[in-house]
Amino acid sequence: MFELDTLSTLVAATLVLLLGRKLVQSVSLLKKYTIPEPVAGGLLVAIALLVLKKSVGWEVNFDMTLRDPLMLAFFATIGLNANLASLRKGGRVVGVFLIVVVGLLLMQNAIGIGMASLLGLDPLMGLIAGSITLSGGHGTGAAWSKLFIERYGFANATEVAMACATFGLVLGGLIGGPVARYLVKHSTTPDGMPDDQAVPTPLKSRTWVV
């Protein structure tokens, strides 16, 4: 078993991100469908670590000290990039979008709790596998898992939350790019012509305001 300290974990995460960037730049299919660099690199490394653990018994443990601060910093920068003027400019469309999103969140929770009940599992597990992690991500999952542990005695809430959030993140990255490309390709410009030249913009080329 290999134990990585805080600095080693940070270096390893950086190398995985750089690996993902190289993969996206080198493999045309990944670039075409806008697969996120962290997903490309992280999925490859995760598979490699799984093979090493199953074949030769090697296991790597990462230090999670920086996990929460980095997640908070990430979501804070996204929040600072939003503004009410853009929301008001969207008008009725934004309102309809909000209603649809709320409906989908409720559907995620209903399906999660329903499946957990059918399988004889704790309904809280279905709730964690619903909108808490699939829409909220790792940060929301970590926050709610602490509440479930302290108030409801759900001992493995954190592990379940991290697994569900990772599952949602990876599948969202793999499915989101192709779906977005399809929607953009079949959308129309104001003159009624398909906008074939527009493609989803990778995360690295966006401008973030901190």
Image (spheres, rainbow, N blue to C red):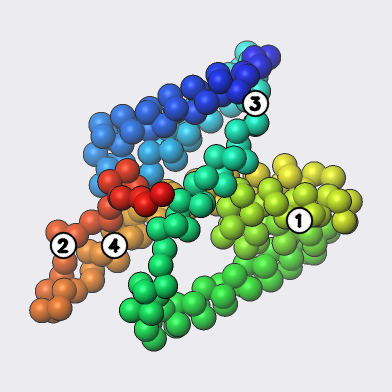
First in sequence, mark 3 or 1: give its number: 3
At 41% from the left and 49% from the top, the residue drawn is 210
The percent position of residue 71, horizontal first and vertical second, equals 56, 44
Q: Is 11 placed left or right of 92 in the picture? A: right
Placement of 176 over or under 103, stated as above or below: above
Type of the residue with mark 3 = Asp
Q: Residue 107's image quarter?
A: bottom right
The percent position of residue 150, horizontal first and vertical second, equals 86, 51
First in sequence, mark 3 or 4: give its number: 3
Q: Residues within 10 Å of mark 1 (few under 14, many from 20)?
A: many
Type of the residue with mark 2 = Asp
Q: CA distance from mark 2 to mark 4?
A: 10 Å
Along the viewing direction, whichever of 150 and 61 lies nearer the viewer = 150
Along the viewing direction, whichever of 176 and 83 lies nearer the viewer = 83
From the image, tell me which residue sits under label 2: 196
Q: Residues within 10 Å of mark 3 (few under 14, many from 20)?
A: some
Tell me the element at label 1: helix
Q: Residues within 10 Å of mark 2 (few under 14, many from 20)?
A: some
Q: Are marks 2 and 4 in contact (CB under 8 Å)?
A: no
Q: CA distance from mark 2 to mark 1?
A: 43 Å
From the image, tell me which residue sits under label 4: 182
User: What's the mark number on residue 63?
Assistant: 3
Q: Is 172 placed left or right of 28 in the picture? A: right
Q: Are marks 3 and 1 in contact (CB under 8 Å)?
A: no
The percent position of residue 97, horizontal first and vertical second, equals 44, 77
Q: Are marks 2 and 1 in contact (CB under 8 Å)?
A: no
From the image, tell me which residue sits under label 1: 125
Tell me the element at label 2: loop
Number of marks in the rendered image? 4
The residue sitting at the front extreme is 210
